[in-house]
Image (cartoon, rainbow, N blue to C red):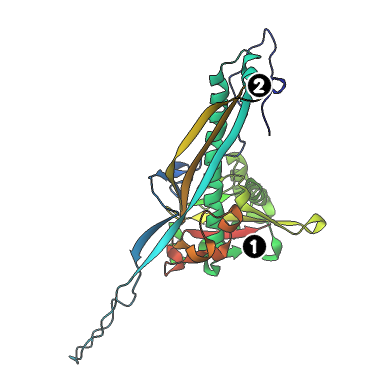
Amino acid sequence: MATTLPTDTKFRDPFFQSGYSEVIAQAVDKFNAGSNGTIRLTSNRKPGDYDYAAFFKNAGGLVSRQDQTSVAIASGIKLSQDEYAAIKLNRKIGPVEWTRSAFLKPGLSQDAIRVAAGEQVAKDVLADMLNNAIRAGRAALSGNAANKFTVPTNGTMATTSLVSGLALYGDAASRIDAWVMHSKVAFDLLQYQIAPSNNGDVVANTAVVAASPLTLNRPIIVTDSDALAVTTGSGTAAVTDYFTLGLSADALRVEDTEEEHVVIQEVTGLEQLLIRMQGEFAYNVGIKGFTWDVSNGGKNPSDSALGTSDYWDKVFTSHKDLAGVVIQSR
């Protein structure tokens, strides 16, 4: 059992406690406006393990040539509905334990530890939501060949790679509103663009002055999510593939569906009095144009299952109506 003891805290007179806590380093402020509207975080209490929504499929062929030399019966075209499902992920907070003396010895109030724990939990919750939305989006798009471009010969990201990714959408390329990439990929792109042999002095100087890569007039969302880096093999044979998402509006949806519930209690019967904090919450993840495979993926999947392409089924007819594109590089 891991419990905070007085020896785990720092107190030195006449110094004072800073009131700050080390927080997660990953940039997690990428929802809603931070992602140019491509990754949506909303709140809506919903029961159950799945969230179903129905939609009318594109029937196609609703407009055709009229034969004005005939009065034959015209064949009817059927409109049909399909549905997609978002998957609910159940999460726990803690438990976190500390002895009563752990905050008395450094002259802290119990509220100080509660605030520190709360700040860290808030960041971790956002990181979990963001990483799993990206993980699901990467898996869904990677499983659809029409939406995936792989940089040839295991190459790194270049401007031409972004163009090839956009080209997957053809005349609908304007629907791609933002790039989501790992910082390693962003710096690979910047290094490519500042080399005069690749793009010329004008582009290179522009990239250097701007201190960020040029991304075909689309914002770049940089976050070092583990969902964007997939390592295969082991030892000297290990390789890491990086996945860059080109997302359309409302591509990835995170919905806070079960309210956070946190319990703080005093625990007796031990050598010292303990205070324990534990909580739980749940949220849903949905990908535009895809449904979670309820039969095979099941309830409350692990991160690994959530990131498995086979568990995300395409339900929209056109690949241009999906969440976007994915570019794989090294």
Q: Tell me the number on the disc at residue 76.
A: none
Question: At label 1, which amino acid type do we have?
Answer: Val
Q: CA distance from mark 1 to mark 2?
A: 59 Å
Q: Residue at x 59, y 15 (%)?
A: 108
**Which residue is tagged 1?**
151
User: Residue 77: image x %, image y %?
Assistant: 28, 79
Above/below status of 115 relative to 152: above
Q: Residues within 10 Å of mark 1 (few under 14, many from 20)?
A: some
Q: Nearer the viewer, mark 1 or mark 2?
A: 2
Q: In which quadrant will I find the C terminus?
A: bottom right
User: Residue 299: image x %, image y %?
Assistant: 51, 56
**Which residue is tagged 2?**
272
Q: Are marks 1 and 2 in contact (CB under 8 Å)?
A: no
Question: At label 2, which amino acid type do we have?
Answer: Gln
Q: Residue at x 50, y 32 (%)?
A: 263
User: Residue 143: image x %, image y %?
Assistant: 56, 66
Local SS, label 1: loop
